[in-house]
Amino acid sequence: MKAVWPRMLAITCLLLILDLSKISQAYLLQRLLEEMAKPLFWEHKEVYYWAGGLSASLILTWMLLENSFLKAELLGVNMKSAVLGMLYKKTLTICEPSISTITSGHVISLFSTDSQKIQEMFGFVYFIVITPVLLGVSTYLLWRELGVSCLAGVGVLIVLVPILSVAGRFFGYMRVRTVKKTDKRMSLMSEILASMQITKMFTWEDSYSTLVKNVRREESAQVMNAQLMRAFNNALYGCSPYLVAMATFVTFYHHGDGHLTVAMVAGTMSIFFAIRMEVTYFFGLGVQGWFEGKASCKRIQKFLMLKEMKTLRSPPLPVNTPSSPSVVCDRLYASWNKGDKEPAVKDVSFTANRKNNLVFVVGGVGTGKTSLLMSLLNELIVHRGSVTINGRVAYSAQQPWVFAGTIRQNILFGKPFKKEFYERVIMSCALAPDLMSFDEGDQTQVGEHGATLSGGQRTRISLARAIYSEADVYLLDDPLSAVDNKVARHIFENCILGLLKNKITILVTHQIQFLEHSTNIVYLQNGASCVEGSLQDLTNRGVNFVSLLHPQTDDGFSDGDSAIDTEDGWHYSLDEETPLRPPSAHDLHGISLNVDNCESARTSKRSFKSAHSSIDSFEAFEGNDDYETIRGAIPYKIYYRYFKEGIGALPTVSLFIAVITGQVLLTLADIWLAEWAFVQERKAQNKTYESKLYIQNNDDNNMYIFVGLSCGAVIGNVVRLLLFFAALVKCSRRLHNQMFDAVLKAPLYFFETNTSGKILNRFSKDIYAMDEELPWTFNDMIQLSFLTLAIFIMNCLSVPYLCILLLPIICFFVGFRHFFVKTSRDLRRLEASSRTPFYNHVISTLDGLSTIRSFALHDVLMEEFNACADYQTEGWLMYLYSMKWFGQRLNFVVTLFSICAIFAPIVLARYIELDEGLVGVSLTYVLLLSGMFQWCVQQSAQVDNLMTSVQRAFQYADLHPERDEGTDKDLRDTWPEYGLLTFESASFSYHKSLPYVLKKIFTAVRPYEKLGIVGRTGSGKSSVLNMLFRLGNNVGTVRIDGYPIADLRLKTLRQSISVIPQCPVLFSGTLRKNLDPFSEHVDGDIWEALDDVQMKDAILNCKQKLDTMVTESGNNWSVGERQLLCLARALLRSCKILFIDEATSNVDNETDALVQETIRRKFKECTVITIAHRLNTVMDSDRIMVLDNGKMVELDEPAILLENSNGYFRKLVDQAGRNEAQRLVNVAEESKRLRHLLLLQSKTKYPGSHITVSKTKAEIINYFGTQVVYETTV
């Protein structure tokens, strides 16, 4: 406030002058009517003076009205921009422990709702000061005219002020409560949208729909209370002149010294009308805005006061500097939260420098490996010890962060484009084959969170970003676990031992076959540095890694068994028919790097900006979004549907009848008062009179009728507004539920092509528009429309010749409004669309804070945020200026009409007989036209614009759901009994417009069989899972126990398959709710499942045990622990088919072995399909399916596949190194021997277990009705 008080003072002065000019119009009108009451008044020059003065005052009002409010709006926009900048700057520096105390929904609410409240506060806060001044001036003028009787009316106004103040405080209070519910809803929806694939697989749509609807019901209850109070407030505003007039004139009638006159009534009513909006509306908005803004400021201040991280790392080392990069960790104790019982990192010490530059960090699940890297990045709270890093740091997270943009933009990430080095990075990170498979090469849009990429591809892009940064120190959090052995070996050889050979690399890994290449090893157990030293040192000291990690030491990378030619360290080939050779220039060009089409000197700011904040980039990726395009006017059927589905057709008709009745009563009260005053004036002058309303001689009866009409109008309008606001809140709630149900049932492709920022925008900004803005805007439009109609009718009745002028003005208004609404609607939509990149930028930043900070890109991100915020502000300013432009011109025409209406009775009085009462009412109403009529038209346009939010909501409500044409017809109650899977020419794509990622799969998975699926990254392994769950476009036939899955209801199908996903997903809430969301199991079963996955001890160490809270997305658990908890969830779910999608890629080998043993024991009577990059996970499987480029290239027992020296599977095994390959062969042979011993038992125990599949033909003896015979593609 201190920084902007001069501007606020100037705006206050302008608004005060504007309001005083309105009050002066009431005084001038009274003097004019007094002159017009004289005989032959048209011959007196005084009447023209008063008419001219009144016209001049109207012109002054026209000049000030839009300009003064525009300045107020601009100040609000400026303050909002400043707040957004502070919020984002804080977001970039907030420490990790502080982040765990807030949710992403809360942060988004700060950026959207709270910043908007601060902007709105500066729109009307000035009237807190102006209103008392206006009350004083008005009281003085009324006292001069009415004497002590005016105190009754002024008293009513004064009583209204504290009532409105209390209402304002109530709004602030309700706002705080509403925002809490909104935050809760948005956080919940954010989590659900981030894990829609898991939600669909586990058929949690209905449960989450109920959960969100319950939160929405609580939120709507708060909104309803606030809106009902607002309705009552608006009713006081609309009826305040009648309450004040009733109190004033009844008092004057009983205790006044004189009689009523038309001039007195018109002047008094004009004063009341002049200050009505300021006293009963703007003052209330000012108070409401003040308290709501104050509440938002407190929320923002609380966020800004969160603890920030301190920069401990040194700046980049200059080239040729004598200093060397180094990392020194000295007896470090650190934790995620200040109140943690045990530190996440405890007593860890090690040193890394040029000579000791490859440090391995190893340990079991949850031992603090990631926490140690976070400590090095200064993201954790350090209690004791120290961390010193000399040099620039690059970081590759365990859960890779990929922002919406192209692959190249994700890799460059703020660095200039260097063609040669960029190509080396691409090849060393094994991205070349992937880029060759994309039509657009490295210009491929990856979507939000890398939606179009596999997990391994996201990891390698994140790694490539770190390598390309050319830092001094590299912190790599287990990048090798997300890729297969062949790619892992290639990355280790060409990245870590190649491009990074002269850099300091601290590598977290479970791939201990590479340990012999380390210069130092830090072995962690429960956050403590158990041992530290080289592999030889630790071996000499008796450290036995076998107890933790299966020995996978390699003979080296130069043996002849390697499928990667390492002669120059960065060549890669996957196709067995392609000879291993250095890539030629033609090969690199074939990758579609498009190097020649880009400026080699392109700066990071430009490349990152184009990806992260450019509207063109977003539209390019989302340009085919059929759900986004809205053109033309809002169809009337949208209005009809909104009310019909919200409250029903009959209540809608009744509501609008109540609206009309309320306005008719208000107008009748005005006319009756004017006619009564006209009659009293004639009686006092002893003149004859004839009332058009048949006014009686009995003044007491006239007074009673006036009071009755006024009270009826007040009561009718209060009831009308309460019903109207309640109806629209109800409509909003129902529409929200409809659209959320539709989103939950939308196909997975919808979420891959629509960012969560865009979807959340619908559920935040659009719902806010329907909850908060549409009810009062709609009410304003209806109320002002009827009042405007009444004004025109009254003017035509008092001076019929005004109809001649009125007709062309109406035609002008209709055409002008049509032009304006069309333009403003498009501007409003542009403003709405500009919010999407803004929110996406914020959400993306929250997801990748650790990565962004490790690259020290605060300034670049801040610049991009400013670009997004500026774009959003520009959209709003264009809309705002168009509104003011329209209002200025509309007010000009209205002012001309008002001047004509003032002079018309003066000029025409000598020719026609005028009704003084009607003239007084019409001129009183004419003064309302200035500002009111343009506000009416603007509000009608605003309603049209706000209805775009309704239309956008209906677009989501009308989303095409997933194809669910199954009927479960003839399905046995015991289905599935065996878990037999058959694939008959089965192909799969994620959308019918996209190419197939699985192509003509012919095979069968026997009942209770353990099948492993292997293949390079992007070969289609995870797509098998999506095909089984019907998450895309299935072609061909897939059967479970002989029943086609296409004939099943989706819920039936998905509940019959249990899955442990590739990306472990936990939701905020208790641990119990994450493991058993529907309370189907007793605690004993849950503890047994936790014990089976080696997590029981970790949970017992938690204070709340099973009621331990899980933060948003499970961020208070390590990735490995999340994977184990997801496995425990699967153990609790009894299904005949279990699909494990690389579920143990982030756990150590000992834990992996224990988990695999648990799976074999617990799911021995289930069909288990496992996807794994680490071959030891699937070497004891009954059979192995090898995929390449979406095709099944091999399928047989592991031992049999290994017999083919040129086979795909054999090459994958050889990539592990000679010793490890031999160990894997031994495992396969032993598994084969055990299976053959159990074969006879299996045949008799499990029907269908004697099915055999050869390399050329598979015959499945059908126990379920028909015989299926097909050829395999192997």
Image: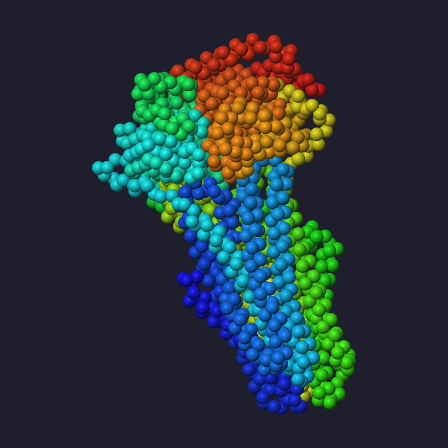
Left or right? Give the position of 857 relative to 615: left
Outermost residue on the left side: it is 322
Identified at 59% across, 25% down, the residue is 1085
- Name the foreground residue: 830 vs 936: 936
264 to 129, vertically: above or below:
below
109 to 421, vertically: above or below:
below
333 to 726, vertically: above or below:
above
Q: Which percent across, then down, holds residue 675?
A: 71, 79
- Name the foreground residue: 961 vs 687: 687
- Name the foreground residue: 175 vs 85: 175
Q: Which percent across, then down, holds residue 248?
A: 65, 76
Identified at 65% across, 15% down, the residue is 1247
Q: Quadrant of residue 561?
A: top left
Q: Which percent across, then down, holds residue 357?
A: 30, 30
Q: Quadrant of residue 1159?
A: top right
Identified at 49% across, 41% down, the residue is 448
Q: Which percent across, then down, holds residue 1150?
A: 45, 21
Instruction: Report how many numbered discs are placed on residues in the image.
Output: 0
Identified at 63% across, 54% down, the residue is 224
Mark yes or no: residue 195 visible. no
* Image quarter (top left, top right, bottom left or bottom right) of the C terminus: top right
What's the colour scheme?
Answer: rainbow
* Image quarter (top left, top right, bottom left or bottom right) of the N terminus: bottom left
Mark yes or no: residue 674 visible. yes
